[in-house]
Amino acid sequence: MADVAIGGATLAPVRAKASHDDILMRLGLCVLLAWLIVVLALPLWTLLSKSMEDSEGRFVGLANFATYFSTPSLFASVWNSFFVALAVTLIVMPMAFVYAYALTRSRMRLKWLFQGMALLPIFAPSLLPAISFIYLFGNQGLLKSLLAGGSIYGPAGIIAAQVFYCFPSAVMILATALALADARLYEAADALGATRRRIFFTITLPGAKYGAIGASFVVFTQVITDFGIAKVIGGKFNVLATDVYKQVIGQQNFSMGAVVGIVLLAPAVLAFVVDRLVQRRQVALLSARAVPLEPKDQRLRDALLTVFCTIVALLIATIIGVSVWGSLIKYWPYNPSWTLDNYAFGNFDSEGWNSFFNSIQMAFCAAIVGTVIVFLGAWLVEKTRGATALRAVVQFLALLPMAVPGLVLGLGYIFFFNARANPLNFLYATMAILVINTTAHFYTVAHVTAVTALKQIDPEFEAVSASLKVPYWRTLLRVTIPICVPAIIDIAVFIFVNAMTTVSSVIFLYSSDTKLGSIAVVNMDEAGATAAAAAMSVMIVLTSATVKALHLVAERGLLGRLQAWRRR
Amino acid sequence: MVSSRASGRRNPNVMNAASAYLEIRNLVKRYGEFTALRDVSLDINSGEFVCFLGPSGCGKTTLLRAIAGLDPQSQGTIRQAGRDVSSLPPAQRDFGIVFQSYALFPNLSVADNVGYGLVNRKARRSEIIARVAELLVLVGMPESGSKYPAQLSGGQQQRVALARALATSPGLLLLDEPLSALDARVRLRLRHEIKALQRRLGVTTIMVTHDQEEALTMADRIVVMNHGVVEQVGTPTEIYHRPASAFVADFVGTMNFLQGELVAPGRVSVDGIELSYVDAAARNGHSRVRICLRPEDVRVRDLGEDRINRLTVDIADLEFIGAFCRATLRLPQSQRSLIADFSSNLMRDYNLEAGKRLDVILPPDRLRVFAED
């Protein structure tokens, strides 16, 4: 029946001819595919093959993995990483849930402020909370006596700093999930006389279930793959992320470094798969006709939530504040007189302020280059007629970076770009490779943002343009890009902020000329110049937070005027 | 099952091949295992207003998108104005299109939207401005050129979309459910306006709709589709009064269906009641049949001494609709019932009410008989 061979079986299948536009777009997709292969697939492939070579470059199969898993000192890190990640997830999730609940389901006042406070850690490199905890509980810590003989260097410090560092991601994901509520369900439950408690356990929690699963995996992965915190506050407590660094930079054992990288890849890939599955379900949860939920007044609930959020927000402010304070005083904690000496970076690190300006230059270039590639790429994937297989491959590669920890990608880059036989070898140790690496590292979130914005546009614009004989690129310039301006700026700011704060991926790739601010923090901390490390962290927070603030102001003012057509 | 409607040469939908503006031959569209169009052949004449009518999933939009080249067919040919366009991309075909979503560019003013296809043709600025103004007058919105789409009502947006589609004077206008997103009242008004505009411009037009009333009032010819097959092509009156299949009879308008048996050519029996019918197509070889009759065709007045198809029925129920009443009539010695539409006049003249007994005639020339599936 499927084969309708009527009117004579001789009918040849119709092969649709490609228009000029179609051919151009397919070529564009091919270029994008080649780009993603070079900046993602090949480095990862090189890493994988490196993990199966001995120090002379001979293929040894899984021998390195066997060595790894049978060496207790190495294998212990797996358990350490797992334990720390699990502890952080268990602490962050309930906190983030209550906080997100307050932001979305209460009538708490000053929500904008609480929301901003919760997101503040995003603008800091992960090293900053670690430095703050050292200031508070370290060898010369203000509150060291509270630890009753325990040490902050090790799991305790890592967990505390990670909780701070992972909190924003968890809150954002949970708040998104909790915001997707259908008021009709709550009205129905009210009408049936359900108690608040019952409503919470039968409607609210199940509704946020997928968000909670997704957030847990994101937090878990973030902890396992983060390098900065364990480096600064981990002491002798080895975790996977610091092992990679030690194997590669310390012992120059590249094969073993590659093995640890592959081990590190496993939880991230798992989290990625779970996230994909969860997102597919989340979409189906809310029908298009759902009525948004308006929280009702409940004095006691709102008061309790306000108290909770205030405490959390104050903790966040304190942790950032301690680093700011530490960077501004002469000698912690004995000489608390004000000084800007710690900001004279030249006294602590050979590159001085240059590394900060390098960061800005790198983040700026990555934001521009990344946004152009990501947006055009997303447009090609969404709008190219035909070329189904090509689009699917590009889409897969665009989602891949989400599953690749920065350290692993950075390691792949050394192996791939540093190889003598590679014609792209000239890129090694340049600013360009840092920019390329950063755009590749943060490709997925930017790509998904662009695709989401493009999907919200009427899919028939291209059909209309074709019927009017207007080339696609003209509609892209005159209609699609102007409509997507807010999303495009979102992407640029996202890449900028992450480029400013990232450590893990670029730690393997910088040279003395291209050292970044976040790396200078690691170096200065290693050299014992904690106050200068704090000062550089503060500079990074200030820069990325300022860019974000400008973004918000621009969105309200300038953009509003340029986009008068949105108004009714 | 398909082959009865199949081979292109004898297809009744294909009329005068030489003169047709759009010639569709043996079109097949497959999506993986699913076949959305099964060997569709159709001719559309120049200047005609044709509606593709059918339930959702019948293939009407698929056919429209194949004609536009947006989703090319898997097999078959399409010729437009004598040119084979089967494999051409949309940009190389000659059509204007209006979607249910309007697909207006939200960041461009109404004038820029209407002039969107003109700017590309290297026309002079003054010419473009004049043409845009002319089109806005044509769709009755001369003052709205500087507004943005978001400031317009749904009906106004659809007019702008229409003006934009007509701006480049395409040979073929495609309308994909253009009225479905609008309020009932606006829909009625736009029906007339679109039809009048089409008459005035004489542009060959294809409209996809699932609304049979829309199709009946607007189309010169209707193409009724189901499961990827063309069930019938005909004028609105032909479709309504002489449906070619039980599906068409059921889908267009309200219809009574009675199950019966064929007893002789031109005679059927429903639970022992014998009825005569006049139907061109012989239904020999099928003993089980479905007999169809429109509710408004049940005759009550001027029965005289007529005996043919005369029945005595009970009025089981009367439903007030407004301009008329819909009566449920129980057939004698049978559990079956018929619905009949009685005008207010008839109700008064015959003093009809529920529970009353009355004589009706089921006119033989109004009965349609189809073989049971």
Image: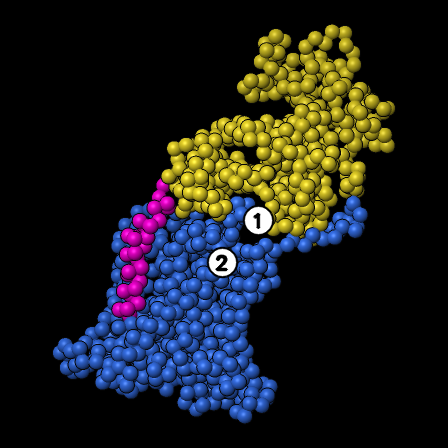
On whether residue B240 falls in the magenta region, the answer is: no
Q: Quadrant of residue A506?
A: bottom left
Amino acid at dot 1: Ala
At which x and y percent is residue B51?
A: 62, 34
Q: Quadrant of residue A184?
A: top left
Q: Dot 2: within a 10 Å radius of its alpha carbon, few (fewer than 14), some, or many (20 or more) residues? A: many
Is any atom of residue A66 visible in this view?
no
Marks 1 and 2: CB-CB under 8 Å? no
- Is residue B169 left or right of A432 when viewed as pictured? right
User: Which residue in the protein does label 2 denote?
Assistant: A379
Determine whether A81 is above or below B101 in the image: below
Dominant SS in magenta: helix
A208 vs A335, nearest the viewer: A335
A74 vs A416, nearest the viewer: A416
Q: Dot 1: within a 10 Å radius of its alpha carbon, few (fewer than 14), some, or many (20 or more) residues? A: many
Chain letter, blue in picture: A
Is any atom of residue B299 visible in this view?
yes
Residue B91 - label: 1
Q: Mark 1 lies on which chain?
A: B
Chain letter, yellow in picture: B
Amino acid at dot 2: Trp
Image quarter hosting the C terminus of chain A: top left
Measure how far apart labels 1 and 2 are at the Cα level. Answer: 19 Å
At which x and y percent is residue A232?
A: 33, 81
Q: Name the residue rendered at 42%, 56% in the picture.
A: A177
Circles 1 and 2 on the same subunit: no
**Magenta region:** A541-568
